Image (spheres, rainbow, N blue to C red):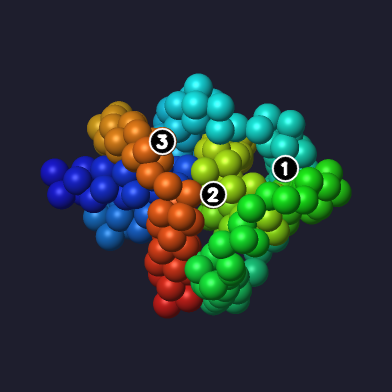
């Protein structure tokens, strides 16, 4: 019961900023004693459920720029595969990824509000670079790529916070589906509790997505910064 409540809370908070909650899901399940070979596929399946619902709601609200999404997602998938086959010492990649998330969180908070207005059109080359980098880091670290693309787009002024959140959910959905297929091909299995966990993730996504449609861009920006800071600190402390 406690693990279900924790997973629900994580799903709510992450969905509030267009994220799925994979990093939080992994942490809770690991602390609850879920076997290692069941962690990644189970968390990814929960990501798929949560991100599918969030993507649907944000699309209905007109917050997903599908042309921009394709520019991000197409280079991300092969880059995620490349990142996934590179084996770095665990301390190195967790420290690097944690530092990147913390730096992005700080930038999200300290950048002037005027810099967050998309006054300059995003370039396709720039979007492809962000997508490839996010995909590579996602494969390298096992963290959903949404936490990388959202701050980059906001800090560059290419998307408002809600628009960045709208791009994050389907981006995470595509990456998670690809990664989940890969984990299953290597013999990893879903946890027996997946049906319960998936229902909890879906319910949390429903609550969190309802919130994002009502709160301000400023609040989305600060909640996203907090999510990235917590994830970064968790990684850096490993």
- Could you say whether the residue bearing mark 1 is in a helix, strand or loop? helix
> Which numbered circle lies on residue 72?
1
Rounded to the nearest angstrom, the CA distance separating label 2 from label 1 is 16 Å
Looking at the rendered image, the disc whose residue lies closer to the viewer, 1 or 3, is 3
Residue at disc 2, secondary structure = helix
Residue drawn at (60%, 32%) of the image: 64
Left or right of 109? Residue 21 is: left
Q: Residue at x 41, y 54 (%)?
A: 219
Q: Which residue is mark 3?
A: 213
Residue 129 seen in this snapshot? yes
Q: Is residue 40 visible?
A: no
Checking the image for residue 161, the label placed there is: 2
236 and 159: which one is in front?
Answer: 159
Q: Does residue 144 appear to the left or right of 190 in the view shown? A: right
**Label 3 residue SS:** loop
Q: CA distance from mark 2 to mark 3?
A: 12 Å
Considering the image in quadrants, where does the N terminus appear?
A: top left
Seen from the viewer's position, the closer of residues 64 and 82 is 64
Residue placed furthest toward the top: 60
Residue 229: x %, y % from top left: 45, 68
Residue 39 placement (x, y as % from top left): 40, 48
Whole-percent x and y of residue 119? 72, 51
* Quadrant occupied by the C terminus: bottom left
Q: Residue furthest left?
A: 1
Please determine whether, in this image, residue 157 is positioned above or below residue 12.
below
Left/right of residue 29 with respect to residue 168 in the rendered view? left
Residue at horizontal 32 percent and vertical 44 percent from the top: 12
């Amino acid at each position: 019961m406690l693990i279900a409540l924790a997973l629900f809370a994580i799903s709510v908070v992450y969905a509030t900023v267009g994220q799925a909650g994979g990093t939080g899901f992994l942490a809770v399940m690991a602390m609850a004693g879920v076997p290692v070979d069941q962690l990644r596929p189970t968390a990814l399946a929960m990501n798929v459920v949560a991100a599918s619902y969030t993507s649907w709601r944000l699309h209905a609200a007109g917050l997903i720029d599908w042309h921009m999404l394709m520019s991000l997602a197409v280079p991300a998938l092969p880059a995620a595969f490349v990142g996934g086959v590179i084996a770095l010492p665990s301390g190195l990649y967790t420290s690097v990824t944690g530092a990147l998330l913390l730096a992005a969180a700080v930038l999200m908070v300290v950048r002037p509000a005027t810099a967050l207005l998309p006054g300059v059109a995003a370039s396709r080359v720039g979007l492809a670079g962000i997508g490839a980098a996010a995909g590579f880091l996602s494969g390298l670290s096992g963290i959903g790529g949404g936490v990388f693309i959202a701050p980059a787009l906001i800090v560059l002024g290419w998307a408002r916070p809600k628009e960045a959140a709208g791009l994050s959910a389907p981006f995470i959905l595509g990456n998670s589906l690809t990664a989940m297929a890969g984990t299953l091909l290597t013999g990893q299995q879903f946890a027996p509790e997946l049906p319960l966990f998936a229902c909890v993730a879906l319910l949390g996504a429903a609550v969190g997505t309802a919130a994002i449609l009502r709160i301000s861009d400023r609040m989305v920006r600060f909640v996203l910064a907090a999510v990235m800071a917590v994830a970064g600190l968790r990684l850096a402390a490993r």
